[in-house]
Structures are given as structure tokens and as C-alpha cells.
Image (tube, grey):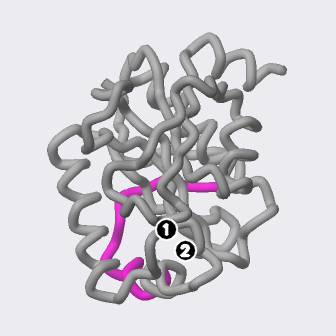
Amino acid sequence: MTDLLTLESPRLRLRLWEDEDLAPFSALSADPAVMRYFPKPLSRLESAAFIGRVRGHFAEYGYGLWALERKDDGAFIGFTGLWNVRFKAPFTPAVEICWRLARDYWGLGYASEAAFTSLGCAFEQLGLKEVVAFTSEVNLPSQKVMQAIGMQRHDAEDFDHPALDEASPLRRHYLYRIDRAGWLKAMHG
């Protein structure tokens, strides 16, 4: 199997997390604008615990949420990658594609570029049949990325996220899916 610990795209390096990533990751995870579609911003301790879970996922499965670094200046800009869905739902078990970028790097195509690279790993290296993504119905920016990378939504699969309170405006989620053929079509279309 190819080394899954570092992936590259034209402008980005997807790599394992380093201790130095905690400060910039904590800053972006504490930013209310970045976290507006999550239950709350994260503290530094919660960000460190998140990185610990990501490292554990890599140790267990050989893939996970890669730290995102710009090739031109080495700047840490967030994460993108593949994550095993940890709650029960009609679509689980499943592998999810995720991303979170610092606000300064929005609108530059980095999320889509890194997501295409992650999907390439999922289908070409891991041999997965399908990858899912989901987000709250109000998170239009993430939905646009999902659509840009060729993912398809089926209204009948929308669901209430089990980890969110019934009163939360973020509870209702849209589910998107993509398979290898969809990824290839999006890459070349």
C-alpha cells in the first residue's frame, strides 16, 4: 500500500499533525466565524483533544484527517481528510470526508483541492466503494464544496444529527455521497 501519511495536491501538502499545529489549529477552532456551523468554538484543551483523536484514528486505520499545509510558505491552514463515522445512522458504517479551514484561506479553492486529493486516496489507495459527507442544512459553504467535488444529495437521506440537541438549529443534516465513478467524473468534468 502507498504511504498514506502524506498526500500532495498542486498547492497543498496533507500531512500528519505536528505539535506546532496546536496553536494555529486552536486559533481557527476558537474563531466564531469558522465554528458557526458547529455547536460551539473549541478551547485550546478541546483542540488538543481533537488532535489526539485524529492521531489515534491514523494509528488505528492508517488514514484520517490530515493537517493542511500550503506548499509555497508552509502555512498551516486547517485540515481535510477521511474519518470513520462514529454514530449510528441509516447510512453507517461509513467513511466521511471532512474539512475545516482558517478564515484567511476561504474562497481560494483549497477545500475542494484537498477534498479531491482525499477522495483520490479513498478510491485509489484504500479501495473504498463510497465516501459520505454531511452538514447542517444551514451550512451552505460546505454544501457548495460537496457539490463542487461531485457529491450528490438525496433528500430522503436527510437526518437529525444524534449528537445535537433537538432544539439546535444545526440538528437537521443533509447527507451527500460519492463513489469512484462520481469522483472520476468530477475530476475530469
Q: Which residue is mark 1?
A: 38
Relative to 38, say whether 89 is above or below: above
Tell me if residue 64 can be seen: yes
SS of the residue under disc 2: loop
Q: Residue furthest front?
A: 167
Q: Is residue 45 left or right of residue 96?
A: left
SS of the residue under disc 1: loop
- Quadrant showing the C terminus: top right
Q: Are marks 2 and 1 in contact (CB under 8 Å)?
A: yes
Q: Which quadrant holds residue 152?
A: top right
Query: On residue 35, which mark appears?
Result: 2
Frontmost residue, 126 versus 161: 161
- Taking the magenta stretch, the answer to whether it contains residue 172 is no
Highlighted magenta segment, given as a residue range: 12-24
Look at label 2 and name its amino acid.
Met
Relative to 11, say whether 41 is above or below: below
Frontmost residue, 137 versus 186: 137
Q: Residues within 10 Å of mark 2 (few under 14, many from 20)?
A: some
Q: Residue furthest right?
A: 189
Q: How many marks?
A: 2
Measured from the top left, where is residue 145 in percent x and y? 70, 46
Q: Is residue 64 left or right of residue 186?
A: left
Residue found at x 34% / y 72%: 18
Look at label 1 and name its amino acid.
Phe
Q: CA distance from mark 2 to mark 1?
A: 5 Å
